[in-house]
Each structure stands twice: as C-alpha cells, then as structure tokens.
Amino acid sequence: MSTRAVLSPDGTRYRITGNKMWITNAETADVYAIFAKTSDDPGITLFMVERGTKGFGVGQIFEKRVVENSSFGELILNDVEVPLESVAGKVGYGSQYAVRMLNSGRITIAALAVGLAQRAFDEYLEVAVEGKKTAGKHLIEYDRTKARIAEMSTEINAARDMTFHAAWLKGRFDDNPDNRDLLRDYVVASNGAKLKASLVAQKTCEYLVKIWGASSVVKENTAMKHYLDSWLHYFGEAVPEVLENTIAQMETKKYNTRKGL
C-alpha cells in the first residue's frame, strides 16, 4: 500500500499522502473511508476524511459503460492533515476492518446480482411468451426455451436463498463476534452467495441477449445494458477465483477443527 499516514511529533494528528484509484462515488461522496499504512504501527489504519479537507481532492473521473448512476474515479491526498478523531476504530486494525467490509459487501453484491438476474429473467419471459415467433410459434413452445427458463428459475431461486442465508448468518455473527465457528460459516456463506449470484446474473443476462439476437445491440433495448451491468457484480468485491480460494480455505479450517488437526 502506497498511501501513508504519519503521526505528527506532538501526537495530535496524522498527515496522509497518496492516491486511491477506482473509487465508487468518488465524485459525489461527502465523507471518504481511507485506508493508509501508519508509520508508527506495522498495520494499516482506517481514516474518515471529509470532502473539503485541505490537501484532499478528487482526480480524474472515469466514464463507465455500466451502472452510470454512480461515479468512478481517483482520490488525491496531498499532505492531508486529520485529527486523531478521524481514526475509525483502532490504529493498525484497518486490514481486519477491510475484511469485515468485504464479507458484508459481498452479501450486498449478491443481492444486487439476484435483482438484476430477476429483471433479466422477467424480460426473457416477456420475449419468449408474448414476443418473438419462429415458424409461427412463440419461442415458449420450443423445448430449448423451456429448458432455459427452468434453468434460470432454479438458479435464481438458489442464489436468492443463499443470499438470505448469508445475511442471516451475518446477523448471528454480529451478535456473537467472538464465535470463530460462526465466523467461518458466515465467510463461506457470504463468499458463496456472491459467487453464485454474480455468475447466475451473468448467465441470465447472456440468455436475454441471445433470445433478442441482433436487436439486442440497439440502444433502446435494455438487454445489452443488463449484460454489461452483470460484469460489475462479477468483479465487485472480488472475482470468482478469489471467492473460491476463500471458501476452500474456510472449509479446510472447518475440517481441520473437526479432525483436531
């Protein structure tokens, strides 16, 4: 991590220097969560920095092809001085807070992905049942279309149930933060829900594009936009490979605990 926070000689404030890239809502936020390497501790510390603080600014804003209602950009911290009260939690505990945010955020992404998948599924049904025809028959009359509808329905319901389960486990863990077994179950569930839901959303949106065919590229057609939006859920809060590794690690720990290894 290149962003550094140095404690002043009198111990009353920190001076933060560095840049942050690919920050959601960079252009519109009023308060920013900034992770920085603290010079007086081997760990990372979380700071809350307000817009308008001297030395703090927003750099370039990137134009996105997905989820246009939020900005995506760069934060610049040039000797930004903040009081000790700007430290969120404990000094040096930033990495632990980041992991907690990711676990919780993955449930949020899962919920968004389920919603997108349901929207794409509803639009797919509209095309299949009421829209396009081939050889004088609506597409719903073909077995291949029925198979895809069954696939999407079961996958979306599975992703939704996994998301609800992960949220329920998060609530239990929040009430029992020292329970390590519950933590492992929660991490597996949140990572699994995000993994499942993001892939289901992507597949459902892909099917929607395919049922529309060439007309899906027309701007008035929402199919391609849904498909592009699904990639944000794919990348957001970790790609599938990272989620798979995390799940495998947690399941291995659970196994070792049961076996006393």
Image (cartoon, rainbow, N blue to C red):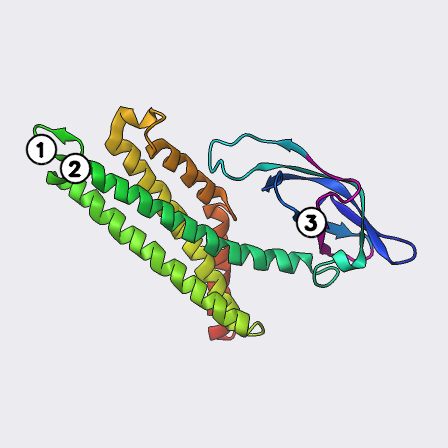
Left or right of 82: which side holds 58? left
The answer to whether residue 211 is visible is: yes
Left or right of 104: which side holds 111? left
Q: CA distance from mark 3 to mark 1?
A: 57 Å
Residue at the spot x=88%, y=58% of the render? 11
Looking at the rendered structure, which numbered label has been put on residue 34?
Answer: 3
The boundaries of the magenta stretch are 40-58
Name the residue nearer the viewer: 60 or 38.
60
Residue at the spot x=47%, y=38% of the render? 67
The answer to whether residue 256 is visible is: no
Mark 3 / mark 1, whichever is N-terminal: 3
Q: How many marks?
A: 3
How many C-alpha atoms fall within 10 Å of the one at disc 2: few (<14), some, or many (≥20)?
A: few
**Is residue 120 found inside the magenta-colored segment of the image?**
no
Estimate the x, y position of residue 64 in percent, counting from the top left. 51, 32
Residue bearing mark 1: 137
Estimate the x, y position of residue 90 in percent, counting from the top left. 73, 63
Q: CA distance from mark 1 to mark 2?
A: 10 Å
Q: Looking at the picture, which amino acid does disc 1 mark?
A: Lys
Looking at the rendered structure, which numbered label has been put on residue 184?
Answer: none
Residue at the spot x=34%, y=27% of the render? 220
Name the residue nearer the viewer: 162 or 123.
123
